[in-house]
Amino acid sequence: MTSQFTAEPFNSPLETGLRSLAILEAAFPNRYDLQRLVELDYLVVHSADVGGPDSLHAPLPLRAGELLVRRQLIERGLLLMMSKGLIERHAAVEGIEYIAGDIASPYLASLSAPYTLQLRERARWLVDNFAGFTTEEIRSLIRRFFEHWTSEFEAVKAIG
């Protein structure tokens, strides 16, 4: 029997699900749809790019491409966390939204790995600084960074 969840350590359903859980727990009782979680996941991983604490992941030059594959990864992570009762899915007028479940906070509090502690810190920072942003404001912020990285890529391509 094959599982839909792989044993990949980076951007696995476990890692992306844990990041979504941390974001939703920090934002509780707010609910977010999948697209907002994709955008917030990107920002929590690359927090230094938006004036926040050190990024969780290395600042790779072509990281803008991550946005293209992130949605499916986040969705798989949400499914994993929902299967454990950590995240709940609700139907809303605007579509499907996700919220931290009742056991999200105790579960996250029980984790002590440095990555998890840093993730929770960045998720709280992210929510404190960007929770009031509209969808368009978040997308505009990410678009500015995407345009900056694209121009850097073109410069590197021209040199090579």
Image: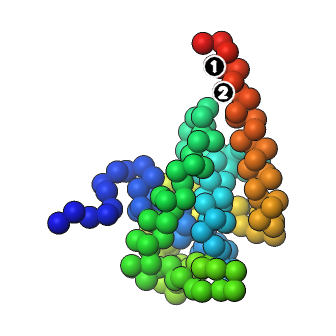
Q: Is residue 22 left or right of residue 53?
A: left
Q: Nearer the viewer, residue 4 or 40?
A: 4
Q: Amino acid at mark 1?
A: Lys
Residue that appears at 33% across and 62% down = 5
Residue 154 sits in quarter:
top right
Q: Residues within 10 Å of mark 1 (few under 14, many from 20)?
A: few
Classify mark 2: helix, strand or loop: helix
Residue 4 point in image, percent of width and height: 31, 63
Q: Does 101 sit above or below residue 74?
A: below
Q: Position of residue 108 (x, y in %)?
A: 49, 72
Q: Position of residue 1 (x, y in %)?
A: 17, 66
Query: In the image, what residue occupies the spot 41% across and 61% down?
Result: 13
Instruction: Quadrant for the C terminus, please.
Output: top right
| Residue 107 position (above or below residue 68) | below
Q: Looking at numbered disc 2 in the image, what kind of residue is underneath it? A: Phe
Residue 118, above or below 64: below
Q: Residue furthest top?
A: 159
Alpha carbon separation for disc pair 2 and 1: 6 Å
User: Which residue corresponds to mark 1?
Assistant: 157
Can residue 121 be seen here? The reply is: no
